Image (cartoon, rainbow, N blue to C red):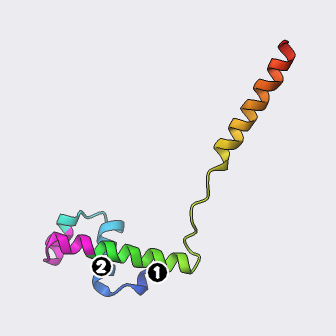
Amino acid sequence: NQGLRILNDDSRTRLILSDIEGYTYEEIAELIQCPMGTVKSSLSRACAKLRTYLLQTSQLLPKQPDETASMQKSKWRMNVHENSSRVG
């Protein structure tokens, strides 16, 4: 919520209509009576500004690599190795 406050009223309204309320670009353009291209470009700028803010305030951390898959592969390799040792 605090991140939305950094956006001007128009950008915040468009972002809420799009990302929270689920309106399409066309619906937003019709609602606010402006060209669809303007809606798209202002949403793009608003998202970029919000993302920068969230990254700078550590509210949006970069996605960490998924360690679960690599750990599962390691366990599988160990099991295969142990089983092949028993057979021979």
Residue at (61, 59) in percent of width and height: 64
| Between 30 and 41, the one nearer to me in the picture | 41
Q: What residue sits right under mark 2 in the picture?
A: 13
Neighbour class for label 2 at 10 Å: few (<14), some, many (≥20)?
A: some
Tell me which corner region of the image, top left, top right, bottom left or bottom right, holds residue 27.
Answer: bottom left
Q: Which residues are magenta?
A: 28-41
On whether residue 7 falls in the magenta region, the answer is no
Relative placement, left or right, of 59 versus 16 is right
Q: Secondary structure at mark 2?
A: helix
N-terminal label among 1 and 2:
1
Residue at (83, 13) in percent of width and height: 87
On whether residue 29 falls in the magenta region, the answer is yes
Q: What residue sits right under mark 1 in the picture?
A: 3
Residue at (42, 86) in percent of width and height: 6
- Can residue 1 be spotted in the picture? no
Residue flagged by tag 2: what amino acid is it? Thr
| Between 19 and 74, the one nearer to me in the picture | 74
**Magenta region's main secondary structure?**
helix
Q: Secondary structure at mark 1?
A: helix
Question: Where's residue 45, x and y in %?
Answer: 33, 76
- Can residue 5 be spotted in the picture? yes
Q: Is residue 87 above or below residue 78?
A: above
Question: Where's residue 63, x and y in %?
Answer: 57, 61
Relative placement, left or right, of 51 versus 87 is left
Neighbour class for label 1 at 10 Å: few (<14), some, many (≥20)?
A: some
